[in-house]
Image (cartoon, rainbow, N blue to C red):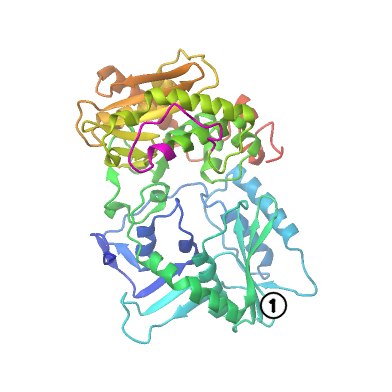
C-alpha cells in the first residue's frame, strides 16, 4: 500500500488549481519527482528567497524558440525576449537549429499551417469533491503549436537537440494527445499530430497522428496512471535539478555542507558543480558552459574507442557489484563481456577482458558482508551554503568496511606507464572525496574510512590508499578543490579560451572562437 502524499515542512499551498506541464511526464535524471509534484499542486515555500539571476541564458532552447516567435509574430507585436545575454556558442547553435527547422518543415501549399498565438491548455473541473482538493486541473504543452486556418488540424512540433533510440514515455505522449484534442483556445480539432524534430540535423520522428477520438483513447490508456505518478511523486532526487529548484531550502533529502568548497560568496547565483565541470572549465570556460547546456557533442571525440572502452568497463563493474548478494568478481571473464549498448572493436574487447581479470585481485566486494554495505555509482550531493553551490559527486563505488565507508575510484589504462603527478592533482575527484570524508559528510565510523584508487593495467592492478584524516592530505585536497572552483565561481560570461585544447573539444563546432569551428559535429 502506497504512503499518503505529504508535503515537506515549510511549504504552503498557494492555489487550488493543479497545473501539470507535459515535460513533467518525461521524468528522467534531470528532474526531481517530489519537486514536480509540489510545483504542480501549487505549493510555495513559506518564506520565498530572492535569487540572484545569471547573466547568461541557461535555457538552451530559449533563443531558438524566441527566433521562431519573431518569425511568426504579427507586425507591430513586441517580441518576447529574455533579458539574459546569449553566449556565443548558444547563439551559433540556435542559428543552426533554426535553419534545420526551416529545412525540416518547408511550407506546404496543399495544407497551410499557421502558428497559433497562444499554446493550448486543457482544463478540467472535478464535478464533486476531489482527492487532491483541486478546484481545477490544467495540462499545458510547450513547443511549436500550429493549426489549419479552420482549426480542424492541430500539430505540435517538439524541439530536441538530437534524436536517439529512446522514445518519450507513453504517459508523455498521452498527456500531449489530451491537450491537443481538448485544449483551448480554438475549436476542437478533427485530427492531431505530434512530432519531434532535432535541431542538430533536422530529422523528425512522429510520436502520434490520428483523429481526435484516437488521441483521447491514447490518453485514457496511458494518461491517468502517468498523471498519478506525477502528482503523487514523493522521491526527492538531489542532483542537477537542485540548481533552479524553488524548494531547496525545505528539501529533506539535500544535506548542507557549508564551506565545502572553501569559498564565501552566498550572494552569487545558485549553481551546481562537479569535478567534471571543473575539468571542463579549466580546459575552457566556454566548453564548460556549452556542456552544461547539453549542446550536441562531436561523436568522434565523445564516443572515441578509448572513452567507450572505459565506459563499458565501468558499466560492467557497476552491474557486477550491484547485483543481488555481493560476491567478489571472478578471474574468469568471457570475451563477450561487453554490456549492451556498447560497440567495441575486437582489440578493445580483448584489452577490456584482460583489465577485468586484473580487477579480481583488488575487487572491493571481498570486504563487504551484505548488499547494505555497497552503493554502486551513488550520487553524493551537498549544498555548500557559504558558496551557494550544489556539489555533485558520483563515486564509482562506496562500500562499508567494518562500519567505515570507503570511496573507491576505478581507472583503466592501456599501458603500464605511470604519472609522477600527485594523485590528488591527477584525479581531482579524489581530492573532493578527501574533503567530504574528512568532514564526516558520509557518516559511518571514521577509523577505517579511506579513499582508494584502483588503476587497471595490462600487467596488473595498482591500488592506492589515501588517508583523508592525514593533515597534509586534507590541506592538499582543499587546495585542489578551491583552485578548480575559484575562477569558475565568479565567472558570469564563460569566454572561450582557444588553444590546443580545441583540437579535442567535443563542442568546438558551436564555438566561433575555435580554429576548428565549423567542422562536423
Q: Quadrant of the C terminus?
A: top right
Residue 396 locus on image (x, y percent): 40, 34
- Look at the picture and state if 247 lies above or below 72: above
Q: Which residues are magenta?
A: 319-338
Q: Is residue 91 left or right of residue 492?
A: right
Q: Is residue 139 left or right of residue 321?
A: right
Chief secondary structure of the magenta portion = loop
Q: Quadrant of residue 369?
A: top left
Residue 253 locus on image (x, y percent): 29, 50
Q: Quadrant of the N terminus?
A: bottom left
Foreground of the two, 454 or 485: 454
- Look at the picture and state if 470 lies above or below 395: above
Q: State the residue at coordinates (69%, 49%).
A: 96
Q: Magenta stretch containing residue 334, yes or no?
A: yes
Q: Is residue 178 left or right of residue 94?
A: left
Q: Which residue is mark 1?
A: 148
Q: Is residue 161 left or right of residue 404?
A: right
- Look at the picture and state if 518 lies above or below 162: above
Q: Quadrant of residue 323?
A: top left
Foreground of the two, 46 or 393: 393
Residue 305 locus on image (x, y percent): 61, 31
Amino acid at each position: 500500500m502506497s504512503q499518503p502524499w505529504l508535503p515537506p515542512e515549510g511549504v504552503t499551498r498557494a492555489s487550488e488549481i493543479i497545473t501539470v506541464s507535459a515535460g513533467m511526464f518525461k521524468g528522467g535524471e534531470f528532474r526531481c519527482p517530489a519537486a514536480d509534484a509540489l510545483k504542480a499542486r501549487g505549493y510555495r515555500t513559506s518564506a520565498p528567497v530572492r535569487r540572484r539571476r545569471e547573466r547568461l541564458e541557461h535555457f538552451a532552447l530559449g533563443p531558438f524558440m524566441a527566433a521562431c516567435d519573431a518569425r511568426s509574430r504579427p507586425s507591430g507585436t513586441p517580441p518576447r525576449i529574455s533579458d539574459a545575454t546569449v553566449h556565443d556558442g548558444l547563439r551559433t547553435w540556435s542559428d543552426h537549429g533554426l535553419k534545420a527547422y526551416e529545412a525540416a518543415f518547408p511550407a506546404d501549399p496543399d495544407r497551410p499551417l499557421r502558428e497559433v498565438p497562444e499554446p493550448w491548455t486543457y482544463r478540467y473541473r472535478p464535478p464533486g469533491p476531489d482527492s487532491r482538493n483541486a478546484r481545477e486541473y490544467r495540462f499545458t504543452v510547450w513547443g511549436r503549436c500550429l493549426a489549419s486556418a479552420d482549426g480542424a488540424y492541430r500539430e505540435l512540433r517538439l524541439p530536441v537537440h538530437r534524436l536517439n533510440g529512446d522514445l518519450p514515455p507513453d504517459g508523455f505522449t498521452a498527456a500531449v494527445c489530451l491537450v491537443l484534442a481538448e485544449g483551448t483556445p480554438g475549436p476542437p480539432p478533427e485530427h492531431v499530430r505530434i512530432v519531434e524534430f532535432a535541431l542538430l540535423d533536422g530529422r523528425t520522428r512522429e510520436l502520434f497522428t490520428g483523429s481526435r477520438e484516437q488521441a483521447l483513447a491514447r490518453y485514457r490508456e496511458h494518461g491517468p496512471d502517468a498523471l498519478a505518478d506525477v502528482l503523487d511523486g514523493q522521491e526527492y532526487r538531489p542532483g542537477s535539478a537542485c540548481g533552479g529548484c524553488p524548494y531547496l531550502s525545505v528539501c529533506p533529502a539535500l544535506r548542507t555542507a557549508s564551506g565545502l568548497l572553501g569559498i564565501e560568496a552566498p550572494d552569487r547565483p545558485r549553481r551546481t558543480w562537479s569535478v567534471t565541470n571543473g575539468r571542463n572549465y579549466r580546459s575552457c570556460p566556454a566548453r564548460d558552459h556549452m556542456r552544461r547546456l547539453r549542446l550536441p557533442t562531436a561523436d568522434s571525440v565523445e564516443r572515441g574507442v578509448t572513452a567507450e572502452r572505459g565506459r563499458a568497463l565501468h558499466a560492467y563493474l557497476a552491474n557486477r557489484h550491484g547485483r543481488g548478494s555481493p560476491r567478489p568478481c571472478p578471474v574468469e571473464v568471457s570475451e563477450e563481456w561487453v554490456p549492451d549498448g556498447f560497440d567495441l572493436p575486437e582489440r578493445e574487447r580483448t584489452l577490456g577482458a584482460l583489465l577485468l581479470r586484473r580487477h579480481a585481485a583488488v575487487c572491493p566486494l571481498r570486504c563487504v558482508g551484505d548488499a547494505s554495505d555497497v552503493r554502486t555509482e551513488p550520487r553524493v550531493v551537498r549544498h555548500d551554503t557559504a558558496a551557494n553551490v550544489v556539489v555533485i559527486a558520483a563515486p564509482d563505488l562506496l562500500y562499508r568496511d567494518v562500519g567505515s565507508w570507503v570511496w573507491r575510484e576505478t581507472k583503466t589504462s592501456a599501458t603500464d606507464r605511470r604519472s609522477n603527478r600527485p594523485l590528488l592533482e591527477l584525479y581531482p575527484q579524489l581530492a573532493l572525496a578527501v574533503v567530504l570524508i574528512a568532514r564526516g559528510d558520509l557518516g559511518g565510523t571514521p577509523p577505517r574510512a579511506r579513499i582508494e584508487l584502483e588503476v587497471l593495467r595490462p600487467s596488473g592492478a595498482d591500488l592506492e590508499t589515501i588517508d583523508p584524516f592525514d593533515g597534509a592530505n586534507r590541506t592538499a585536497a582543499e587546495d585542489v578543490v578551491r583552485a578548480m572552483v575559484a575562477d569558475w565561481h565568479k565567472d558570469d560570461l564563460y569566454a572561450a579560451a582557444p588553444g590546443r585544447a580545441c583540437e579535442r573539444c567535443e563542442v568546438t563546432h558551436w564555438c566561433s572562437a575555435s580554429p576548428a569551428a565549423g567542422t562536423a559535429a
